[in-house]
Image (cartoon, grey):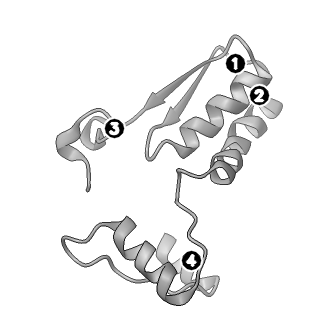
């Protein structure tokens, strides 16, 4: 569904060949085609944008004691932690993930 939506915006997609690392392929494509490479989570503007999810939640819901955020690549978690820290000093932000997809805490599940 996400891939179809992305293509709907005019993006071209490419499957990652088996054994290739995303960073290698995207760096090569960016150099070849003179493109800007914006990482999916490890970029200050991406993190800031992800933080708007917590900002909007806090604005709508009011003060929170805890904010549970999916770990993933940590961009969402980082952005939400920054926003919550700025808006609610006492709010504890916890990174969470499903037991069957615990690649943040279980190195054997990480996709390299």
Tag in front: 3 or 2 = 3
At 39% from the left and 83% from the top, the residue drawn is 14
Q: On residue 104, which mark appears?
A: 3
Which secondary structure lies at badge 1? loop
Residue ID at (77%, 28%) = 61
Q: Which mark is residue 64?
A: 1
- The part of the image, by quadrant, that contains residue 19 is bottom left
Alpha carbon distance from label 2 to label 1: 8 Å
Answer whether labels 4 and 2 touch (C-beta < 8 Å).
no
Q: Report, in whole angstroms, how far the alpha carbon at label 1 lies from the one at label 4.
A: 33 Å
Give the image location of residue 21, x and y in percent.
29, 66
> Would you call the spot at circle 4 few (<14 residues within 10 Å), some (14-19), or many (20 or more)?
few
Q: Along the polypeptide, which appears first: circle 1 or circle 4?
A: 4
Do the CB atoms of the residues marked 2 and 1 lie less than 8 Å apart?
yes
How far separated are the C-alphas under marks 3 and 1?
25 Å
Image spot of residue 58 (x, y percent): 76, 29
The percent coordinates of residue 3 (x first, y second) are: 48, 76
Viewer-side label of 4, 2: 4
Quarter that holds the C terminus? bottom left
- Asked if 64 appears above or below 75 in the picture, the reply is above
CA–CA distance in space, label 3 to label 4? 26 Å
Helix, strand or loop for disc 2: helix
């Amino acid at each position: 569904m996400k891939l179809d939506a992305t293509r709907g915006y005019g993006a071209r997609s490419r499957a990652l060949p088996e054994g290739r690392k995303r960073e290698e392929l995207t760096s090569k494509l960016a150099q070849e085609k003179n493109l800007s490479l914006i990482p999916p989570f490890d970029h200050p503007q991406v993190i800031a944008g992800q933080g708007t999810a917590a900002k909007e939640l806090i604005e709508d819901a009011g003060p929170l004691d805890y904010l549970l955020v999916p770990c993933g690549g940590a961009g969402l978690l980082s952005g939400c932690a920054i926003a919550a820290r700025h808006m609610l000093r006492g709010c504890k932000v916890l990174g969470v993930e499903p037991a069957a997809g615990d690649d943040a805490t279980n190195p054997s599940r990480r996709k390299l």
